Amino acid sequence: MKIKTTRTLATSALALTLATGSALAEVSRAEVLDNYADIAEAIYGDSLIAAQRLQTAVDTLIADPSADTLQAAKSAWLAARVPYQQSEVYRFGNAIVDDWEGKVNAWPLDEGLIDYVDVTYGGPTDENALAALNVVASPSLTISGETVDAAEITPALLSDTLHEADGVEANVATGYHAIEFLLWGQDLNGHAHGAGNRPWTDYAQGEACTNDNCDRRADYLKAATDLLVSDLEWITAQWAEGGEARSTLMADEAAGITAMLTGMGSLSYGEQAGERMRLGLMLNDPEEEHDCFSDNTHNSHYYDGLGIQNVYLGEYVRIDGTLISGPSLADLVAETDAALDAEMQGKLAHTMMALGRIKSAAEAGFSYDMMLERGSEAGEALVMGGVNGLIDQTRSIERIVALLGAEGTAIEGSDSLDDPDAVFQ
């Protein structure tokens, strides 16, 4: 991978321009796309490294179950979310990412498919006959009227048979959130502070085992974690030199710029402001949290927002502290309309401040599910601060679409923003 420092050079060049009145060299769209692909490779590469660290922690937990090894696995999962969430801005505009990402980050999920749940969870529903299947407790399963041998829990069983079984999206059997549930268990606190509280003895062997099937639970956790690593290996390779994602992006400059803006706008507006934030607030439902088992939603929102800013500025700080930086959309916009670039950068910074307030409040004890409680004025103000910032920056993204002639850009919406009455119908 090329390590670029173009924005540092550009800053120096800008200072020289101001002093001498000379013109800056134009940044080409091909350079912007190349840097965008480099950042994708770096983000997915970091996600892979973090997942491999999680894999090591999970192997240690399984080999030597204890409160400490369970906590270490949880910490590794939380760390793994930081780079991955910054990759979500590559969705929506890049078909190869959209076709893949459901394997690793699908949510919300009916956790009863995977393991035991509280009696208040209920059983099968008209929408999902497998909502309480409990694979961990069932070496033989019936899916779509056919018997499935689940005596051995393998990555293939999870990905090929169980994930989205019966065509139901809530049957999430793989990815970060399946692993999250297996580490934390259900969050039964409602709007009160607190995450899931799975005991480490759920992975103990022999008489110390709680809630039965500890060996199969460990097998599921290992299979899901190994699968996450292999999925991240695959997507990282797609963004390397010669990979399909990079080659497709670079083959058509106009389509590539459109992909960048589509990802920024759709994540900012319909997905994050709408489906992940405004909808949960409208429903006052803690189950609408993105990382609901671990109470990590404040970080997911923050790093999603940072990913949008990264793409516009053409920079990303790797988990080892290395800065990837190069020609950016900001450079392209500034060449034609410096005021619009300043507006976009200002709005991105404002949104990150609003998301940072949510993050800080949650870390201080006012967790995200508490913010969603009906009648919580402080919570509503914090969440809507983020929502409004994301909506406002999307309006500037739309202006950039027009400026750059990216007519094919299609920004996804959300009923929670575009037709609120439909949410309750």
Image (spheres, rainbow, N blue to C red):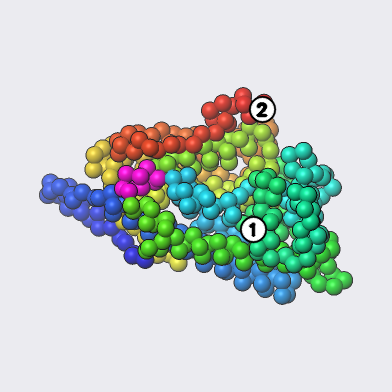
Q: State the SS at label 2.
A: loop
Observer-side mark, 1 or 2, equals: 1
Tell me which label, 1 or 2, sits earlier in the chain. 1
- The amino acid type found where label 1 is placed reads Ser
- Total numbered circles: 2
Q: Which residue is mark 1?
A: 159
254 inside magenta stretch? yes
- The amino acid type found where label 2 is placed reads Phe
Residue at left offset 59%, top offset 54%: 103
**Residue 336 at x, y percent in the picture:** 24, 39
**Residue 50 at x, y percent in the picture:** 54, 65
**In screen coordinates, is 128 left or right of 4?**
right
Q: Considering depth in this image, is 381 or 145 the residue closer to the camera? A: 145
Residue at left offset 68%, top offset 45%: 168
**Residue 33 at x, y percent in the picture:** 33, 52
Q: Picture quarter containing residue 31?
A: bottom left
Range of residues picked out in magenta = 252-260
Q: Which residue is mark 2?
A: 424
Q: Is residue 333 shown above or below 69?
A: above
Residue 200 visible (yes or no): no
**Residue 333 at x, y percent in the picture:** 29, 42
Q: Considering depth in this image, is 403 or 166 the residue closer to the camera? A: 166
189 inside magenta stretch? no
